[in-house]
Each structure stands twice: as structure tokens, then as C-alpha cells.
């Protein structure tokens, strides 16, 4: 059991750090994945971005995804073809269902990132982070959308998930890092001591703080590098040890 999402992120970051990943970029699935991803990005000293996914529910069954819209430049629609065929949805019906969900995706994009564009992941290691994966539906959609953006590698990183979901995600991503795979998986909240509901303002605040922290780290790193160069230059050649 994890103390909270931040604790889960710290532990997940330690595990990912052992992999020595090439050019990692951390992509958080809001809302719950953001506090976890902030700690992962800090551990890897990697850029952090959001991956906003809006589910498109089936007619009469909004919890069952027939498709999803994934924010990006441009945005993408990922179809769940098995569900589309099961409901015998034609192109026109799909277009209406998708159009109905676009306003909420646009609202979230505006609330979370404003006019900031997504970070390019082409040739980079994309790490998709959430606070857990129960059925893995949203994560699968995210993976399929990210594949179209030509990353070097896609890694799914979650603190907790059922064994069968991890196995399914392993067929979609290049690697899955999951700290806990309980045999009897209940709701995500059972695996955390503290699991508060997060608001849009919580997401914005966490991303803002993460951005400031990364800027500070880069500034300090630049100062240290400059200091080392100055120190080297001040050592007279004749006084150096042979």
C-alpha cells in the first residue's frame, strides 16, 4: 500500500531510474496520474507533459469506450473497433459521438496547458504515467495514440495494477513497470492510504510547481558547470601536479 500518490511516484521513479533510459519524457494522464508523474520526472530529471485523453462512450453505455480523443498537435481519434462493430456503429454515428466529447477535451486542454504545445516525443523514450490501471482501457488508448508520434520506446509506468491488465499492457507497450500486482485487485483507492479526488486546479498547480522545479534544477546545473570551467581556467599550467 502506498501512502499517497506522491509516495507512489517517488518509488516508481526509483525503479525507473535503474533502467537508465535514453532521453526520457514523462507523460502524465490527468488527473490522478499527475502527482505520480511529477515525482517520476523529478527522479529522472526528465521533461514532464500531459497526455489528455477523453473517452467516447457507447450509446446508452457511457462507461464503455467506443473511441477516445487524444490531445495533441494535431489531436487524434483512436477507435475501439471491437466495440464499434458490436454496436454496429456507422461512420456518421461515430462522428456525432466524437463531436459530443470534443468540447470537454478542449476545455481540459485549455484549463491544463493554456496555449502551451505538447512536447515532441519523436525519437525519445515516452513514459506514460498514471496512479494505477484497473482495466487499462485509457492506458491502451494512450499507447496507441503515442505510437503514431514515432517515439524511440513506450514505457507504461504505474504503481499498481491487476496481473491480467499488466499482461495486456505488455502486449501494447515496449515495457511495463508496475510496482504492485495484487492477486485480488479492488478499486485503486484501496491501495492508497490517502487517495483524494483531484480538481483541475490541482493539476494546474502541480504542473506549475514541476515546471518551476525543473527550471531551478537546470539553472543550478548550469551554474555548477560554469563554476567548474572557471576553476579549471584559474589553475596555472606551471603549478599543476605532474
Image (spheres, rainbow, N blue to C red):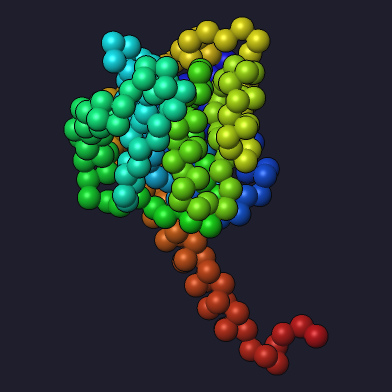
The vertical placement of 139 against 109, above or below, is above
Q: Quadrant of residue 164?
A: top right
Q: Nearer the viewer, residue 112 or 38?
A: 112
Q: Is residue 167 at all visible to an observer of this figure?
A: yes
The vertical placement of 151 against 78, above or below, is below
Q: Nearer the viewer, residue 38 or 133?
A: 133
Q: Nearer the viewer, residue 28 or 203?
A: 28
Residue drawn where x is 36% and y is 31% of the image: 68
> Residue 73, image x and y in percent?
32, 51
> Residue 145, image x and y in percent?
44, 41
Quadrant that contains the N terminus: top right
> Residue 80, image x and y in percent?
43, 27
> Residue 237, image x and y in percent?
67, 90
Residue drawn where x is 42% and y is 22% of the image: 85
- Residue at the limit of the structure toward the bottom, as seen here: 238
Q: Is residue 1 left or right of residue 142?
A: right
Q: Quadrant of residue 75?
A: top left
Residue drawn where x is 63% and y is 38% of the image: 175
Amino acid at each position: 500500500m502506498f501512502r499517497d500518490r506522491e509516495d507512489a511516484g517517488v518509488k516508481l521513479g526509483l525503479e525507473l531510474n535503474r533502467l537508465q533510459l535514453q532521453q526520457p519524457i514523462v507523460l502524465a494522464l490527468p488527473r490522478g496520474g499527475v502527482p505520480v508523474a511529477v515525482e517520476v520526472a523529478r527522479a529522472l530529471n526528465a521533461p514532464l507533459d500531459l497526455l489528455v485523453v477523453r473517452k467516447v462512450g457507447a450509446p446508452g453505455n457511457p462507461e464503455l469506450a467506443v473511441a477516445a480523443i487524444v490531445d495533441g498537435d494535431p489531436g487524434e481519434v483512436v477507435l475501439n473497433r471491437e466495440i464499434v462493430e458490436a454496436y454496429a456503429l456507422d461512420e456518421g454515428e461515430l462522428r456525432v459521438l466524437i463531436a459530443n466529447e470534443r468540447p470537454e477535451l478542449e476545455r481540459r486542454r485549455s484549463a491544463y496547458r493554456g496555449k502551451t504545445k505538447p512536447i515532441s516525443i519523436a525519437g525519445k523514450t515516452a513514459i506514460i504515467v498514471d496512479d494505477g490501471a484497473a482495466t487499462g482501457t485509457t492506458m491502451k488508448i494512450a499507447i496507441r495514440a503515442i505510437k503514431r508520434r514515432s517515439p524511440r520506446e513506450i514505457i507504461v509506468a504505474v504503481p499498481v495494477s491487476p496481473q491480467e491488465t499488466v499482461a495486456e499492457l505488455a502486449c501494447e507497450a515496449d515495457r511495463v513497470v508496475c510496482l504492485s500486482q495484487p492477486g485480488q485487485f479492488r478499486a485503486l483507492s484501496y491501495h492508497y492510504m490517502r487517495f483524494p479526488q483531484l480538481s483541475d486546479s490541482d493539476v494546474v498547480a502541480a504542473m506549475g510547481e514541476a515546471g518551476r522545479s525543473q527550471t531551478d534544477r537546470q539553472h543550478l546545473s548550469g551554474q555548477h558547470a560554469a563554476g567548474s570551467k572557471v576553476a579549471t581556467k584559474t589553475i596555472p599550467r606551471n603549478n599543476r601536479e605532474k
